[in-house]
Amino acid sequence: MVDYLAEELQKMFKDHNYTSIIKLAHRELNQKMSNIDKKNYYFVLAKAYYFLGENKQAFENIKEVMEILELHQLPKKEVFDAKIEYAKILRRIGEKKQAMEIYSELLELHESSLNDDTRAAIYHNLANLHMEQGNFEESKKLFQMALSIDQIYMNEEGQAHTYSSLGGLHFYLGEYDEAINYYFKSLNLRKQTKDILGEATVSLNLGSIYANQLNEELANEFLIKAEEVFKEINHEKGFHSVLNTKARLYYSLKNFDQVITNLEYLENKEAVEITRAHIPLIDIFAEALLKEKQVIKARNVIKLGIDSIHRLTQGKFVEMLPDYGKLKQMLSQVAVIQNKLDEALEILNELEEIGAEIKDKRSLIAIYHSKAQIYLKLGKYEQATVFAEQGRDLAVKYKDSAIAEILDMLFEIYFLQGDFRKCIKVLKNIFRYVQVKNKQRYSLILRTFYLLENVKLKNIKDEFTVLLKFSEIERSLYILQETLHNILNFSSTEKKVEILKQMSVRIKKDTEEINSENEDEPPLEEVLKVLSLDNKKLSELSLVDLLTLLDSIFFSIKHKYISKKYLQKIDWTEKLPLDFQLIIKQKQLILIELLKKHFNPINVTFGNQLLEQKFNQMFTRMSVKITEFQDKISEENLLILLYLISSIAINTLYVIYLSDKDEAERKDV
């Protein structure tokens, strides 16, 4: 290689001008030259393509280098450098075992011939391989060995590289504070050495951490810096990684419109223009379109992705199986939405065959889940049960996050089949998997099934089927109303009293816990004092939090844990949104009325008439109140209001029966 060209290439590498390097090297390779010079240009091409993330081209060129090395005796330093680069590229294309063998051979057979820079590079690359194989302690040890060598010889570039890799290791382990610390050390060194590609890569990694933490401001600060550099040096893979990270951030924030806005340029691309770097973006773009119910656009984007994978892999889509499977899975969802159920099943059958062949159990979980949903929609409950139970068994075995959704679907299938024993069993299992915020919903449904279990639940199956078509808040409202209806219609007062006693015990236990001092949460009275002084904390509470708090106050007063003043004197209305104000004020008035009327000695007359009269009067009064402001609140909050009224009614049933001063009279009934 001519000296001036070598200097020019060195400068281009320093400036990260990889596209120009590739053009120059290809131009020179068209000239007549020695095999040694050819080796040098192929090596240059392999490195340039590697930096650009073009792994296939990098591998093709490094193979040319290795073939020339086999035919010629070259200085050991050149051989070692070529082998290290070869192993790096092998790791990138998934040939990790072969890469590790090359590094191990260099250390075992040539350690005395290796200079410190080369040894540090080998330790570093071996550490990456161990990290990817889950050997985290060995990986840390090797990174530290590489770092020690680079620190002794003041190799700032090597240190920056290793700090970045240590950041990646801790990022992978979810140890974000340590990862950020290492990334900033790397970033500072990259700036000192004017390594703009390294700086952009570290900025991308920092942006990814902040995106994982849903810190939109900091994530965008670093992602924008990275994006500018990747655009400037024409680093397509880095640029697409930034877009992917941004898209996932907005997707996690449920800002699907922003995801679509950032990625809608993909709609205008032809399949021949799509690279492998585009495929993850197509995945998330299609997901966002589906979330926004843009089904036709989603189908077109998914089709673009599938066609592109076939082209990129020359029909051997197994090379990109995760992306292919994901796109096909989404296509089956689109087919279901468009009521093309035969098409959806055909897609899922194809995916099931692939999943079984490669023993991809997690993919099979999603496939069984989807097939069960389709058969459920078709009313074929036996087939739905088979696939849902297969999905459940695999999800339990592999601790897959889909378990809660599959159990929820099994509950629906068993319910439609009238197998209420299995319904109760599934609801119990759901408690082990659902998020805390959803436990209340399942607790309510489960309690309802227990309450109604002894009143021939099958007789009201048709009436309860309507639950499956409702939203969560509508379903909760319906269950409460049905529970109330069935308790009021029990044939014997004894049965009512028995159930209401159970409710009393539960409510008293809950109230005791709320008012007790424990390490996790302060007692209710302390919470109320803080809220009365801190408007900001009060305004941060959701409507459900506020309604639940009022319930806690009501029952704490009943059981004499706190004073009545906390319900009578509290005034939150001016500090809350209008919708909240009306609902909270209404509930306060109702609870105050209940305290005044239902804690006084009111006789429970023989029979059931007085009980029904009381509730009819209560609902009548509440209905009048609702009518006064129903046009002033949203439909969603009106549903919440109806829900809370039903909730108050069912929770105060036991008050009517179990007021202390009524106990003696009730025993006489």
Image: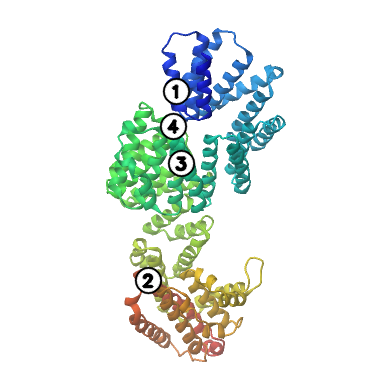
Q: Can you identify the residue that label 3 sits on?
A: 227
Which of the 4 image quadrants contains residue 330? top left
Count residues near mark 4 (Cα–Cα under 10 Å), then give few for <14, some for 14-19, many for 20+: few
How many angstroms separate mark 2 from mark 3 (CA)? 46 Å
Say whether disc 2 or disc 3 marks the residue closer to the N-terminus. 3
Looking at the rendered structure, the kind of residue marked 2 is Leu
Q: Is residue 565 above or below residue 257?
A: below
Q: Can you identify the residue that label 1 sits on?
A: 22
Determine whether the residue tagged by mark 3 lies in a helix, strand or loop.
Answer: helix
x 41%, y 33%: residue? 276
x 63%, y 14%: residue? 76
Q: Nearer the viewer, mark 1 or mark 2?
A: 1
Looking at the rendered structure, the kind of residue marked 3 is Glu
Q: Could you tell me residue 61's position as x and y percent?
A: 47, 19
Determine whether the residue tagged by mark 1 lies in a helix, strand or loop.
Answer: helix
Q: Which mark is residue 357?
A: 4
Q: Is residue 290 above or below residue 94?
A: below
Q: Nearer the viewer, mark 4 or mark 1?
A: 1
Is 493 placed left or right of 620 in the picture? right
Q: Can you identify the residue that label 2 sits on?
A: 639
User: Total number of numbered labels?
Assistant: 4
Q: How is the image coloured?
A: rainbow
Say whether disc 2 or disc 4 marks the residue closer to the N-terminus. 4
How many angstroms separate mark 1 from mark 2 (CA)? 65 Å
Residue 214 appearing in the image: no
Is 643 placed left or right of 160 in the picture? left
Q: Could you tell me residue 619's position as x and y percent?
A: 38, 82
How many angstroms separate mark 2 from mark 4 (CA)? 49 Å
